[in-house]
């Protein structure tokens, strides 16, 4: 009889261990799923950040120097860490350059950028302690993630643009390296992005042009609320390219949680320290495909001053052909899921800018209420990037706007 009791105790002990293992598998399995998702988000962000630095090198026809290679590596590490990767705790970050055919060229951070590099591959390995599975001898869980970002000429930008609307009618009058001004208080003249044909940093009546909406002659500030982007192809919240979030401008994507605000939207987007994390799609001139971006009214000198961070660098701005009123769109377009149409203060109609392309600009500097810069090139029309030939390829085109896109 005593022997049978002993056997029962052993069976109960074994059953408890098995039960704990099942509980641990359920709990830690959920943790592992979340860890994999977090690692993939970090890999995507790191690859895009490294790809953006690589695209800057290509756009400026620069060499694959050690300094430029270090910028790519620093961007990869910075955005991986911002998204929860902890190298000091044993997490691993690896990045490599690839050509336009996705062939491996060499590691990022080795002291140079190989000739033909046009993309960046990032592989992350993240390790975290388990909870219940430690009981059965599994003290850690590991998740690996891989992302590939490719650079090339664009008519679709993956984010990181300045929140300024540029009129197509002004862009069409500009030549490469011609100076322009952005006058933040210039609503009375039709818009704030204007030609500067005399190169004196101010408007000359009868010479320079500032165009608002050519159909309704509405004046506009030109600031964009990137948290409200309407597109007839992306109306449902389940769509990964749904970007109709807020009618005001708290920022998204700055910090570890993309669903919370950590900065004023316009200031964050204008500074480049908190780049807009979602793609922008250009439509065709005179049509209604592509993105419509909500205009943010009011004076924003603080946001204009943040653009000083780009002084001497190339930045990208969306180009629009027409400004649509929200009441007109409400009557003629399908509504976005959940949020409805934006309204101005007092319930009046709001502006939505129809985006038809992107312009590459070189930022000069900001003085008072005026930004001075030089126009480089505009790409108008719908489409995605075409992989370029990369660093040192001999076919560099310094006036072609370069962008990056997640490839894998």
Image: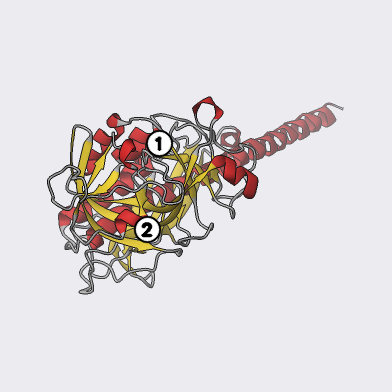
Front residue of 285/69: it is 285
State the mark number for residue 404. Answer: 2
| Secondary element at tag 2 | strand
How many marks are shown on the rendered structure? 2
State the mark number for residue 20. Answer: none
Dot 1 crowding, Cα within 10 Å, few <14, some 14–19, many 20+: many
In the picture as drawn, the residue positioned furthest to the right comes out as 1
Residue drawn at 32 percent across, 31 percent down: 300
Dot 2 crowding, Cα within 10 Å, few <14, some 14–19, many 20+: many
Residue drawn at 17 percent across, 53 percent down: 197
Q: Position of residue 102 (x, y in %)?
A: 38, 69
Residue 212 relative to residue 29: left or right = left
Residue 388 relative to residue 296: left or right = left
With respect to residue 277, does 339 lie above or below?
above
Q: Quadrant of the N terminus?
A: top right
User: Which residue is denoted by mark 1 in the rendering?
Assistant: 254
The colour scheme applied to this rendered structure is: secondary structure
Q: Position of residue 377 (x, y in %)?
A: 27, 61
Q: Position of residue 61 (x, y in %)?
A: 19, 64
Residue 399 relative to residue 126: left or right = left
Can see residue 74? no
Question: Which corner quadrant of the image does residue 23 belong to?
Answer: top right
């Amino acid at each position: 009889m005593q022997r049978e009791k002993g056997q029962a105790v052993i069976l109960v002990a074994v059953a408890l261990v098995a039960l704990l293992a099942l509980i641990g598998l359920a709990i830690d399995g959920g943790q592992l799923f979340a860890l994999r998702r977090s690692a993939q988000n970090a890999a995507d962000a790191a690859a895009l950040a490294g790809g953006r630095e690589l695209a800057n090198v290509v756009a400026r026809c620069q060499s694959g120097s050690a300094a430029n290679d270090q910028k790519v590596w620093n961007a990869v590490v910075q955005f991986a860490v911002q998204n929860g990767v902890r190298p000091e705790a044993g997490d691993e970050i690896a990045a490599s350059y690839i050509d336009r055919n996705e062939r491996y060229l060499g590691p990022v951070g080795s002291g140079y950028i190989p000739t033909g590099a046009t993309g960046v591959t990032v592989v992350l390995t993240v390790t975290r302690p388990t909870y219940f599975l430690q009981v059965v001898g599994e003290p850690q869980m590991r998740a690996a993630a891989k992302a590939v970002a490719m650079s090339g000429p664009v008519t679709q930008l993956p984010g990181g643009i300045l929140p300024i609307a540029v009129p197509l009618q002004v862009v069409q009058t500009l030549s490469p390296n011609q100076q322009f001004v952005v006058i933040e208080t210039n609503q009375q003249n039709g818009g704030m992005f204007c030609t500067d044909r005399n190169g004196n940093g101010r408007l000359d009546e009868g010479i320079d042009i500032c165009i608002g909406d050519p159909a309704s002659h509405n004046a506009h500030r030109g600031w964009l609320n990137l948290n409200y982007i309407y597109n007839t192809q992306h109306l449902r919240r389940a769509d990964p390219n749904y970007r109709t979030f807020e009618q005001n401008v708290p920022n998204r994507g700055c910090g570890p949680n993309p669903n919370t605000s950590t900065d004023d939207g316009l200031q964050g987007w204008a500074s480049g320290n908190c780049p807009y994390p979602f793609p922008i799609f250009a439509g065709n001139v005179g049509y209604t495909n592509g993105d419509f971006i909500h205009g943010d009214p009011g004076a924003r000198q603080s946001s204009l001053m943040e653009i000083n961070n780009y002084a001497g660098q190339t930045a990208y701005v969306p180009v629009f052909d027409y400004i649509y009123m929200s009441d007109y769109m409400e009557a003629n377009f399908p509504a976005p899921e959940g949020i409805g149409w934006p309204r101005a203060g007092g319930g009046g109609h709001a502006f939505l800018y129809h985006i038809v392309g992107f312009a590459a600009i070189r930022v000069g500097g900001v003085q008072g209420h005026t930004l001075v810069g030089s126009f480089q090139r505009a790409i108008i029309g719908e489409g995605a990037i075409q992989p370029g030939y990369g660093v040192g390829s001999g076919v560099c085109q310094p006036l072609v706007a370069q962008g990056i896109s997640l490839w894998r």
